[in-house]
Image (tube, rainbow, N blue to C red):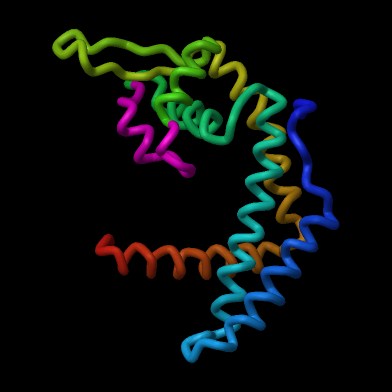
Amino acid sequence: MPSNEKKASPALAEQKRAYYLNEVRSHGRNYSNFDWPSVEVILNLLLVGDELQTHTAGRFARYGLSISAFNVLTILSRRKKEGCFPHELSELLLVTRANITGVIETLVKQGFVVRRLNESDRRKCRLQITPAGQNLLDRILPDHFKELKRVVCSLSSSEKKSFNHLMEKIRSGLVKERGGE
């Protein structure tokens, strides 16, 4: 981990959790539609997401990558031959789309991604992972998958299945609300 990157202490993480769970619960009682179990689910999802983001960002930083850059490399790795247009990448990313141009530029400078110009329309280019990018990904992925397994090792197989089912119900409901699916 780079020396300028700070790792949140467990005490600080617990302080943050306690603040949100206690203060929101206390303040929420002022509102008639406040439903503590619903709010607690969302807060816990956000807190876990924040911890995972911090944990994952630190691990990828050792390789000179952001989470977005790692996601770009994995998408391009799965589309080695045809590559991807930048707008396709931004639609597939699991993180913010706002910085896709900067992420691509950084990966090109690092030699992990190349731009292939479209012969019929030179304004369009496809992005492809380079052998160096694929080699880096091949080095990262075994430990990455091992770490993902470790992070959820306290859950049984049936708990993981139940958790995934519940998360899918929430995701599906949100998508339907905004007019999808």
Q: Residue at x 31, y 67 (%)?
A: 176
Q: Which residues are magenta?
A: 83-99
Q: Is residue 14 left or right of residue 94?
A: right
Q: Is residue 113 left or right of residue 142?
A: left
The residue at 31%/25% (across/down) is 85
- Asked if residue 59 is positioned above or below residue 39 in the image, the reply reads above
Q: Give the side of residue 124 with respect to residue 52, left or right.
A: left
Residue at the outermost left position? 120
* 123 vs 175, nearest the viewer: 123
As rendered, which of 119 and 5 lies closer to the eye?
5
Q: How many marks?
A: 0
Task: Provide residue 21's location: percent of width, then percent of height.
Answer: 69, 73
**In x, y percent, where is residue 122?**
20, 11
Report x, y in % for residue 38.
54, 79
Quadrant of res 16: bottom right
Report if residue 91 lies within the magenta region.
yes
Q: Quadrant of the N terminus?
A: top right
- Relative vertical location of residue 75 with respect to residue 149 in this rendering, above or below: above
* Image location of residue 42, percent across then percent down: 56, 69
Is 143 rendered above or below residue 155? Answer: above
